[in-house]
Image (cartoon, coloured by chain):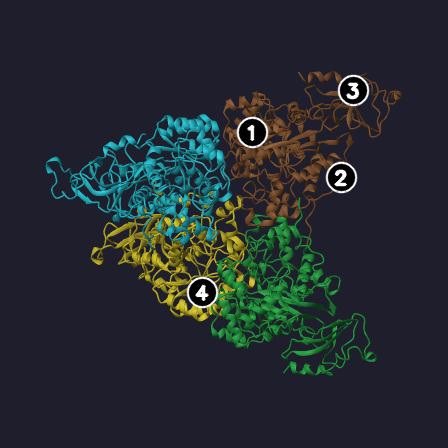
Chain colours: A cyan, B brown, C green, D yellow
Amino acid sequence: MFYGARLPSLSVGSQDAYSSAHEPNKENQVVKDGSIAINGITLIDGTDSAPFENTSILIEDGKFARIEQSPAVPFEAATVIDGRGQYAMPGLLDANVHLLDGLSLTNNFGGIEYLARYEGRLKELCEEAAQLSLKYGTTTVFDTGDPYRPIIGARDAINKGEVVGSRIYAAGAIIGQSGPFTRDFMVDGRTRATKRFADRLDSLWEWPGLGGELLLMDIEDVADRVQRHVETDIDIAKVFVTDHLVSSFQNSTAYLQFSHRVLERIFSIVQGAGLKLVTHTSSIESLDTVIDLGADVMVHHNVSQQVRMPDSLIEKVAAFKGWGAPQPVTNRFQHGLEAIGHGWARYGGGAHRDNLERMIQAGANLCLATDACESSIDRMADFTPEELTDRPWDLGRGSVYWLTAMVETGFTPAQALRGGTRDVAIAYGVDDKLGTVESGKIADIILLDADPLADVANVAKLNKVIKDGVVIDTAALPDNPVATVDGKFD
Amino acid sequence: MFYGARLPSLSVGSQDAYSSAHEPNKENQVVKDGSIAINGITLIDGTDSAPFENTSILIEDGKFARIEQSPAVPFEAATVIDGRGQYAMPGLLDANVHLLDGLSLTNNFGGIEYLARYEGRLKELCEEAAQLSLKYGTTTVFDTGDPYRPIIGARDAINKGEVVGSRIYAAGAIIGQSGPFTRDFMVDGRTRATKRFADRLDSLWEWPGLGGELLLMDIEDVADRVQRHVETDIDIAKVFVTDHLVSSFQNSTAYLQFSHRVLERIFSIVQGAGLKLVTHTSSIESLDTVIDLGADVMVHHNVSQQVRMPDSLIEKVAAFKGWGAPQPVTNRFQHGLEAIGHGWARYGGGAHRDNLERMIQAGANLCLATDACESSIDRMADFTPEELTDRPWDLGRGSVYWLTAMVETGFTPAQALRGGTRDVAIAYGVDDKLGTVESGKIADIILLDADPLADVANVAKLNKVIKDGVVIDTAALPDNPVATVDGKFD
Amino acid sequence: MFYGARLPSLSVGSQDAYSSAHEPNKENQVVKDGSIAINGITLIDGTDSAPFENTSILIEDGKFARIEQSPAVPFEAATVIDGRGQYAMPGLLDANVHLLDGLSLTNNFGGIEYLARYEGRLKELCEEAAQLSLKYGTTTVFDTGDPYRPIIGARDAINKGEVVGSRIYAAGAIIGQSGPFTRDFMVDGRTRATKRFADRLDSLWEWPGLGGELLLMDIEDVADRVQRHVETDIDIAKVFVTDHLVSSFQNSTAYLQFSHRVLERIFSIVQGAGLKLVTHTSSIESLDTVIDLGADVMVHHNVSQQVRMPDSLIEKVAAFKGWGAPQPVTNRFQHGLEAIGHGWARYGGGAHRDNLERMIQAGANLCLATDACESSIDRMADFTPEELTDRPWDLGRGSVYWLTAMVETGFTPAQALRGGTRDVAIAYGVDDKLGTVESGKIADIILLDADPLADVANVAKLNKVIKDGVVIDTAALPDNPVATVDGKFD
Amino acid sequence: MFYGARLPSLSVGSQDAYSSAHEPNKENQVVKDGSIAINGITLIDGTDSAPFENTSILIEDGKFARIEQSPAVPFEAATVIDGRGQYAMPGLLDANVHLLDGLSLTNNFGGIEYLARYEGRLKELCEEAAQLSLKYGTTTVFDTGDPYRPIIGARDAINKGEVVGSRIYAAGAIIGQSGPFTRDFMVDGRTRATKRFADRLDSLWEWPGLGGELLLMDIEDVADRVQRHVETDIDIAKVFVTDHLVSSFQNSTAYLQFSHRVLERIFSIVQGAGLKLVTHTSSIESLDTVIDLGADVMVHHNVSQQVRMPDSLIEKVAAFKGWGAPQPVTNRFQHGLEAIGHGWARYGGGAHRDNLERMIQAGANLCLATDACESSIDRMADFTPEELTDRPWDLGRGSVYWLTAMVETGFTPAQALRGGTRDVAIAYGVDDKLGTVESGKIADIILLDADPLADVANVAKLNKVIKDGVVIDTAALPDNPVATVDGKFD
C-alpha cells in the first residue's frame, strides 16, 4: 500500500518525554527562526492509521521536519505549543469553491448590486474569501471557476506571502460557462443593467473566450480556445458538461453542452497539458460520459435532477479511479428546508442523497467539496434561519458541515476526515506535498480542542490553524474586509 | 438513373389531337365515375424531364391512369378540363409543418389565450390547418410534431374522407420535447395559468411520455419510451437533437439534449421500426452528429445560431444521402425585417443564408419545408406588414415563398419545383405513390395559369387543386372555420 | 320604532292549531296555484323582534300573504311544509358581489385563461354564479361591478324567469375602472395576449366608456360619460374612489382617482338619477371623503392599507347614515393564513379588523358584503387548504362566513342576521319589498334545520330555499354548469 | 414697470471710450482684488430692455459694481476682459433639476447598478452634476427632489466655496415620493436587490419620512411630517400632486396622491414657512387644482397624458400669477424619436406641445426647467443617436435646448432668454439678487461669441462663465469625476 510506506517516518521515542521536558537535549537541537514545536498532541495524520497519542511535531521552514510519538524529550522550537489534550490533523482541503459570490450572481439574488458595488475590487474579494476559508481551518481551496484576473491575482498574492489566506489552486474561467449577464447566471440581467457594464463583466468572466460560444463552434475552433486556456498559468481546468442554471433550478432538466467527440478533445488537451480536469455534471447520462472519458474530479456528481441513479451507474462510479466531490447536506439543514417547503430541499435530499448513500456503500472515491462562496453582509442578511443553519455553501464552516453530513450519510468519521484532507490532495495529484501530516510535507495543520474522530463536528473546535508552518491569527481575518463590512451611507 | 426509367410511361401521340377533339374515339374509352381528363396542358411532371407540352392526363380511381403527350384525341372523362394555356405539376409536399400554432405557444405570443380558447377543439384546428394548406396547393404535409390525439385524429378523418384537407403524415409528439407550459415553449407560462390546465395540456402534448424527462433518464428507460412511441400508429418520428426555444431566440446558443449513445439508440429504434427519422438541429456540431447517425430528414439544418458552417461540414452535407429541409426566406421578407431591425432577421439571413447557398452549390439533397402553422385571426392581426410579407410560416402560401426563396438562393426553378414535390416524397420514402405525375401514382396535381418554370411564384396562380383524383373546392375552405373566424363577443 | 309598525300584521291564533290540523277550516281558505304554507316554524323575521315560535306563513303569488303565530289551524296551500323543529328567516342579501371571476382577472391568477375560455359565454357564467349564490341561501345579490352586457343579460333572464338564480341588482361597469388588460387587473396582461382579444375584452368591461381615461378628462367630459351611464338600465352605480390593484396588493398604498369636485359631480349625477351610489375606498382619507359626499354603500370601508383609523374617523362612520359593507374574515381563515405567512392575511387582520371592531362598538351601520365571485374548477384546484377554509369570497357560502366573522368581531347573532337581510335592503332602499318576512313583501325565505340565533353558522344548515315564492331545487344548481365542469380534453 | 426702475443705473459715457483705453483715468479707479472688468460688450441684461451695445461691466466682491454703456474710459480691474464682439447675459437658471440620476433609477434603466456603484459617494455625484451644469453656463439650479443628505451636503460645499459648481437651491425629498426601490422608481427593484441595501437607499431618499406612507395617513399626521420637513434647512419644497412613474410611462394615467384638504394643509405649511412650493402634476385636473391652491412653480405643467387641455384651463394658467416650468423639446429631438417610434415621443409631442403652444399664445408665466440629471458614462453609452440629439435632460446643455425648443414653440428669443434667467429668479422669489445683470446683484454672467437674440442656440457658444464674480475654468470641470469616468476593471 501506498500509505504504508509512510509509517516508518514516525519514530517512537521514550514514554517519559514529558517528564524530561525540563531537560532538553540541547546539543542536538538547533532552533530555527520561525520553527514551531507541538508537543504531546494526539495526531490524526490524515492517513488510514489510527491516531497517534502523545506525539510531537516539529515544523521548520514551512514543512513538517520531525514527527515522533512519545519522544524522549519535547521538541524545542522558536514557538513551542503544549498540545496535551488537543488533537492535530491536516488542514482541510476543499475540492470545489468559487471564492466570488456565484450565488448572488444568479437571478434575483442581488447580482447586479454585487458586481456594481465591487467591480474593481474583485481580487480583494477573492483574498477576503480565502481568509474566511483559512479562518475556519481550510488551508487549501481549489477554486474551480472564477474570472481569471482576480482569482489568479489573489492566488499569486497569497503564494508570495503578500496576503494571508488559504492556498488557492485556480481553474480561472470554466470551459463553456458564460458570464454573469447570460443565461448561465442572471437570465434577464441585461434588461436591468447598462450594456457597457454587462459587457465588461461578461468578458472578464469568460476570458480567454471560454463562454457559451464554444457550444456553437467547430471542433477545431473549440480546441484552439482550450489550448490557449491551458497555456496560461492556471492550475486546473473545469468543463461544464451540462448547462448551468438554465435548467437546474428553473427547469429541472440537464442539457449537454458538448458532443462526445468535442468532450474527448477537451479532455485530451487539458490532461495532455498535465492539468487535472474537473467536471460539472447534473444528470445520469452526463456522469456516465465523464467516467468513460476519465475525469479527475467530478463535482456534485451525485446530483441527477432528482432521478435515482441506476445501480449499474453507482457501481461504475465505485469502480472508477477518478474522484467524486459530492455535496451532502446535514440532516438539520435538510429538515429545516423541508419544513418550510424551501426549493433548496431538492438539492441535497431525495434521490441525490440516495445516490450518495449508495456511492458510499459501494466504496466510491469521494472527497470534500462545498461549492462555497463569499456573500456580502447585505446578502447574508436576506437568508432565513433555515437557510443559514449548517448552510453547506459557507466558506470554511461549510467544510465542517460536509464532514458531518458525510458521516450522517454513511462515512465513518475516519473516512470523512481523510475525505477532507488526504483524498482531496490525491484527487488533484498534490498528495506529495499536501493532505497529510508527514515529514517533508508542507506544514498545514490544525489543532483542535476535541477529538474529531469522536465527532467530526469537533473540527469546528479550532484551537490553532497553521499554514505553511505559520500560526495564523485567525481572529484578525479578514484583515481587509470588503464584502463583510456594512455598506456606506449616502 | 432511377428517374430515367420513368420516361417510357409517357406516350407520345399524334400532334393534332386537339384538332380532332370533336371526334373522340369513343369506342376505346369507358368513362368511369369520378374520372377527370385534363387535355392539352403543359405538364411539369416533377422529375428531371423537360416540360411536356400539349399533354393529356386521365385520372381514374384517384390515380393517374394515362398520361399522353399530343394524344390523337383528347381524353374523355366524367369531368373534362381544357388545360390549354395552363400548366400542370404535382401537388406540393411540405416536409415540415406543425398544424397547431406552435408560434403562439412560444412566450409572449398569446399561447395561453390560444390553448384556453381552443382546448377541446384541437383536432378541428388540425383539420382547418390541413384545409388551408390544401387550399394553396400543398396536397401532402408532414406534421413533424403535434400532440398525438388531435393530429392523428385529423389525419384519420382526412384519410377516411370524412374531412377534406391535405394528406397528413404525422409524427405525433417529438422525442424530447416538453409541452407548452415548459421551457420549450412558454418559459413562465405556469405563472399565468392554472395548474390543472397546464398539466392537462402538457400531458396531451408529451404523450406517450416523450417530454424533457427523457434527458434525465437512464438509456434503457429512454429506449422503452421510444419503443412504445413507435408502436403507436405514427407515420414518422422526430427527435430534438438540440433544445427548443430555451436557447435559440433568447440565448443564441444550442444545447444538446441527448448523448451520442442515447441518440444512436433512438435512431436504431425508430429506423428499425421502418419509420423515417426527422431531426431538429441548430448548431454545427449537432448537424455533424445526425449526419454520422444517418438521419432521414433534417429540418432547418442550415440553422447554426449564425455561426458560419465550415466548408468541410457543407461537403459532408452534400455527400450525405439524407435530406435537408432548409428554411430559406425571400429577399423581400428578409429586407423588410432588416429595415426595422426585427429579431426574426437573424433566422433567414447572415450565416444561415450563407450556409444554405453553399449547400445548394455543393449539390446537397434539399427539399421543401416551411415549419408553417395556423395562427388565429386575433394573432394574425398582431403581425406588422414586415412580418406578414412573404411570411415563410404561412400554411400553404409558405410553400410558394419557399420556392421563390430557394431560387433566390441558388436553385434553378426546375430544382425548386422538384424540391417541393418529388424530393419530399423521396426523403420520406413515399415516392412510389406521391411526388410526381406518373401513371399509377396518386392523383395529386395542381393546375396553374402561368408557367412555374418561368417564375416559380406562378405556383400561386392556382387554377385547380386536385387531390386523390378529386377537384377541390378551394374557395370553400376552410369549411369548418375555428381559428380563422372572429372571437365571440360577451 | 320604524319596525314596530310591522308587528300587528303578525296575528296570534289559538295555541292548538296543530292539534286541529287534520280539520282544516276549508271554507275559509282558497288554495291558490303555487301557494306554499309553512306551518309550525320558528320565525326570525329579519327585524328587531324576538323569534316567533310556532308560526305559520302563507305564500301566494310570490309574496308573503299571511303570517300568524300559533294560528288556530295550520295554513293550507298547494304545497304544505311542516316547519316544526325548523327555523325560518329571510333569504340573505349580499351587498357586494362580482359574479364574474374578478380574482382570476388579477395578475398571475389565470385571467387570460379564464377570458379566452369563456369569451362568448360570460352571460352564462353570470347566471351560473347567481345559481351558486342562490343554492346557499342568498336570494338577492348586488353586483357592484361587471361588464354591462353579460350582467344585465343575466339579470334580465332571471327576472323574466327564464333562468333560476339569485335576484341581481347590477351596477354594470364601475366608474373609473379599466378593463382586465390594464393596470386595474393584469398589469402586464397585454404582453401575453393578442391585441384584438385584449381590446375586445377591455371595451366590453369598460362600456360605456367608464375606464381609466376618466382620470384624465376634463370635468365636463367626465360628467357626460357618467350621465350616459346612469341613463342605461343599471340598478345601482359604483365609483372607484381609490385605485384598484395598482396599489393595494402590490404596493400597499392608495391613490385617489378623482378630485373632490369631480367626485361631487359624479355623486350628484348618480344620486340625482335616483340610483344608490356605492364606493370603493381603501384609505383613511378616501373614506373620510365619501362620508362627506354622502355615499350610500361603502364596500370594504374598513380597509385602510393596515393603517389604524383614528377614533375620530370611526365616530364619523358611526354617525353617518350611509351603510358600510365591511369584509370581516373568520378567525379560522385568518389564523390559517397567518400560520403560513400568506399575503392575504393582510386583508382581514391587523388594523382592518381593529377598525371594524371599533365600528361595531360605535354602532355604525354595517351590512353583509362578500366581494365574492365564481372561479373555474381549474382555478379552484389551485387553492391551498388555508385559502379554502372559510374563504370569504365564495359565492353563497361566503355569506355565512360573513355572519360568523361578524359575530367573532363583535356583532350579536341577531345583529348579524339583520345585517345579512334587512339592513342590506335598507342600504339599497329596497326594504319596501325585500329583507324581512312580512306580509306583502316578496317571498324570499330560507328554512333551517337549526337555530341561527344560537349559532349563525347554522344558516348553512339549509333545509329549503324559497325565492319569489317558489321552492328552489338547490340540488340541481347550477343547471347549466360552465365554469364548474371539467375542461375538455384534446 | 418694475424693470424700468433699473435703467438709470446704466450710465451712458463717451462714445470713444475705447480709443482712450490706453489712458485710463487711474486716479478715479481703485482696483480691487479679484475684480473683473468687461469692456465693450453687448449686454442683454435679462430684462425687457433692448440690448446695450458697447457696454462695460465692473464686478467687485462677487457682485455687479458698475454697468455703463459707452463709458468714457474702459473699466479697470484685476482682470480686464475685452468684450468687443461678444455678448453678455445673465447666467442661466434652471427651475427644475435632479442632480442625481433619476432616469437610471426608473425601471430597467440601470438603477441598481447606479446605486450600488455610487452608494457612499452621492454627495460627490451631486457636486459633479452641479459642475456639469455650470460648465455649460447654468449658474443656478433648483434641485426639486433628491435625498436630503447628499444634496444639502453638495449645496453647502458649493456655497462655502469648498467646491466649484452651480449654485444649488434644494428641496430635499419630495412630499409624497417614495424611494428608488418602490413603485415610484423601480417597481420590482426589490426582487433584484438585497433588502438591507434597498431599505438603506429608500430611507435615505425619503428622509425625513416623506414617502408614500403619507398617502395613507391621517391629515394631522401628514401635517406633522411636512412641518418637520420645512423646519430643516431646505430652500424650497415640492409636492407630488399626482403619482410618479406608476402611471405615466407604463399606464398612461395619473392618480392623485392627496385629497384636496390635505393638499391645502401642505400648501399652508410650506408657504407659511416662507418656502416656495413646487408641484408635480400630470393631468388636467391636477393642474387645475394646484392653480386653485396657489402653487409657486409648476413643473412640466403642460404634461397631461396626451389629453388636450380645454381652452378654459389654458386661460386659467395664463391668468395665474404662479409660474409654469414646462418641458418643451426641440423639433430635431422630437422628429428623431418619432422616426423610430420611440416611446419618449409621447412626452414632448402631440397634446403636450399643443398645450404649451396655447399657454405661450395666452401669455402664461413660463420659465426654464429641464428635469435634467447626470447619468453615468456607462448609462450614457446605452443611448441611441435619436435619444442623444438635443436630449432635454442633459445637465447644462439641456438649458440651451430648452431655449431653442421654446422659440420653436412660440416664444420670441427675448422671451426665451428672460425665461431662462430673470423669470426663474422671479418664480422662486430670488430676483432681488439673481437673474439679471444689474448693479448690486450677484455677478453671475456668461459671455458668448455670438448673438443669442439672433439665435438662442448661440448660448452654447460660451466664451466665459462667471459665477459669484469669479471666472470659471470650465475646461477643468468636473474636477472630481465620479460618474463620468470609466468603470474600473476586475
Q: CA distance from mark 4 to mark 2?
A: 65 Å
- Return the chain for callout 1: B
**D209 is higher (above) or lower (below) than D166:** below
Report the number of numbered marks.
4
Amino acid type of the residue that numbered disc 1 sits on in the rendered structure: Arg
> Would residue A390 be found to the left or right of residue B210 on screen?
left
Q: Quadrant of residue B363?
A: top right
Q: Nearer the viewer, residue C371 or A59?
A: A59
The verdict on a common chain for dots 4 and 2 is no
Amino acid type of the residue that numbered disc 4 sits on in the rendered structure: Leu
Instruction: For residue A359, say whether it is visible.
Output: yes
At which x and y percent is residue B235?
66, 31
Marks 3 & 4, CB-CB < 8 Å contact: no
Marks 2 & 3, CB-CB < 8 Å contact: no
Residue beneath disc 1: B265
Q: Which mark is residue D214?
A: 4
Q: Secondary structure at mark 4?
A: helix
Q: CA distance from mark 1 to mark 4?
A: 67 Å
Quadrant containing the C terminus of chain D is top left
Residue beneath disc 3: B68
Residue beneath disc 2: B476
Q: Nearer the viewer, residue A422 or D443?
A: A422
- Tell me the crowding category of disc 3: few under 14, some 14 to 19, or many 20 or more residues within 10 angstroms, Cα based: many
- Tell me the crowding category of disc 4: few under 14, some 14 to 19, or many 20 or more residues within 10 angstroms, Cα based: many
